[in-house]
Image (cartoon, rainbow, N blue to C red):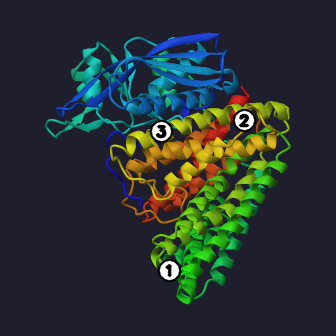
Amino acid sequence: MGSPRKVGLLVAFLLALAVASSGAVVSSGCSASDSLTVPVLWAADQADGTVAGGIEPATVEVRSVGKPGFTLNLKDVEAKDTGDQWQAASASAAAVGTLLSGSDPNEVDVRFDVTGPIDGPSGGGALTVGVLAAIRDQALRSGVTMTGTINPDGSIGPVTNVLTKVESAAEAGYETVLIPLGTEVELDPETGEEVDIVKLGRSLDVEVRVVPDIGTAYRVFTGKNLAPGAGRTPRFAGPVRRVAEETTINLDRRLSSALGQASPGTVSSGASALASQALAAGKGGDTARAYALGVDALKEVERDRFSSEVDSVFDRGGAPSAVSLLEDRIVVLERKADAVSTDAVRRARAGYEQQLLVPVALGWVTYSTALLEVVRERLARKEGLDRGALAELAGVVADAGTSIEVFGPDAVEAALVSRSPRAPRKSEQAVADYLSGYTNFLIRGGRASERYFEDVVRAIGLGGVPDYIYPAFKGLGKAVDRIPKGTNPLDREMIQASQAISYFVIGSVLVSGDSILGLDTFGLGESIPAGAGSELLPNVTEGALSTVEYWSSVLQRRGLSAGYPVWSSRWGRAGLDAFRGTDREVTGVVLALEEAWYSAIGCFMLGGITS
């Protein structure tokens, strides 16, 4: 687990997001129907082994009437097996574009028309620009085209065949080509030599510009800024700071207790060392660093402890006894997960900031519950349950346990105290309607990712099927299938929104993140080897954290606390710094990414409801 895989048509999940060019958007709204055509670069492998490319004029129509949502109209598509690829790209573009626009998803319908050969999810970035421009009723500059995927935080992900795409743009008379960060150099498929894409563009009289995020791309395409200006460093004080300090102290106590209860030899020297570092940081008063180190250490310690317990039971009673222990633990954790979620939504009555952030904070619990169901199903099959397999399943259950019992409740506490007396009032019905709209949008995005992963990625053998992420994702898909149509009471909408957010994020990880960044341990505490993943991973993490920090600053200027996302970015960045240059760097940055991805969506939703 954790090793990078051949990219092929798959692309990386997240790249750096520049702080000054991203952030909140004040929606100008859309008229009854606004449409425009976006020139999307495409390239595809041919039967003879060559690569062909060109420009696909994709029409984006945004309507404020009709049934909200988004649809894809593929007319006479010539490229084989591209429907699911573009369905994933268009769904992500519609969801992220709507999030970034500050529009109410209940009032927006996005439609895409494509008529020619196309290239999978690499058109997502350009389509998102089109969605935003259509919503804001702004024209696109001629002579500009783009390639790159779109990710949940608005970053642009890398793609393949950039050389061919730039050459195709030049042949079509385009003057500017936008490419993702990290794709400036590519191997020539004919010679095998490295090609500097920017220099190639100059030789073809084309300006090749690297764009890390949708804000940068939007400014090139339209000459307008999405964001209202660079944000200052977000404030971190008051109730959220106190919650951060209290949860860090409690985490230290839990860690000390876990070490004290461990039988000799059951906790590895590595886990013990991590715990010592975390406890030392706590005593030193560095709250963010102590919490980040504590999260990682507790995961490792509990994995060791529970795996050892299962192993001991196996010695005494064989596989049936070990299975029984695991099943009993799953039942206990599922009850606790239900209690945490029920209590969280019950307490989120002070204002819409808590009501929108609690579903994000519950991501720890929602995803972990899906992982537990995966383990339950494997135990029920009773196949291959030898000592090693049961120890591995015990590690997954232990990870879920720390998330449900510790990290999820900690996040909920931070979300519940995220409120400001200066925030405008919203009725519970208005918040429920708003959450329902985004739940539906995010489910459609996740569903498109599911189709793409199953029909395209698995069919052509790109990467593997992560042992736990994919079945957990399928479980989340079943959960969102059971969500009733229309707006439900607010407490139910909060739970449903949490399921939709996890479904959308995990779907994006499956489509792209697993192949190049080695994210097949997403949500699990198992140490990821330092050699796993891409060299882009630190930049990925920096970008995601910067997104959260920028949006938090914007939200604070609008009178909100934004305390939970500020705390998320603080301890995530502290962990990034603490692990930098160590053999746990990849583990540390993925841990920070997991928190930042969810928090970014929470910020976007808050930005929309306050626009």
Check contact, mark 3 vs mark 1: CB within 8 A: no
C-alpha distance separating marks 3 and 2: 24 Å
Q: Looking at the image, can residue 377 be seen? A: yes
Q: Which mark is residue 438?
A: none
State the count of labels: 3
Corner quadrant of residue 143: top left
For residue 32, side relative to residue 120 (left or right): right
Q: Which residue is mark 3?
A: 451
Q: Which residue: 46% across, 59% down?
A: 467
**Quarter of the image containing the C terminus?**
top right
Which of discs 2 and 1 lies nearer the camera? The answer is 2
- Near mark 3 (Cα within 10 A), the count class, few <14, some 14-19 or many ≥20, is some
Q: Which residue: 82% across, 39% down?
A: 489
Q: Which residue is mark 2?
A: 435
Of all residues, the one furthest to the left in this rendering is 191
**Quarter of the image containing the N terminus?**
bottom left
- Measuring from the top left, give residue 560's x and y in whole percent: 76, 37
Q: Looking at the image, can residue 284 be seen? A: no
C-alpha distance separating marks 2 and 1: 46 Å
User: Which amino acid, mark 3?
Assistant: Arg
- Measuring from the top left, give residue 393's x and y in whole percent: 53, 69
- Measuring from the top left, give residue 581's x and y in whole percent: 42, 61
487 w.r.t. 68: above or below: below
Q: Which mark is residue 269?
A: 1
User: Which amino acid, mark 2?
Assistant: Leu
Check contact, mark 2 vs mark 1: CB within 8 A: no
161 w.r.t. 572: above or below: above
For residue 83, side relative to residue 365 (left or right): left
Which of discs 3 and 1 lies nearer the camera? The answer is 3
> Which callout, 3 or 1, points at the residue further toward the start of the chain?
1
Instruction: Assign a secondary structure to mark 2.
Output: helix
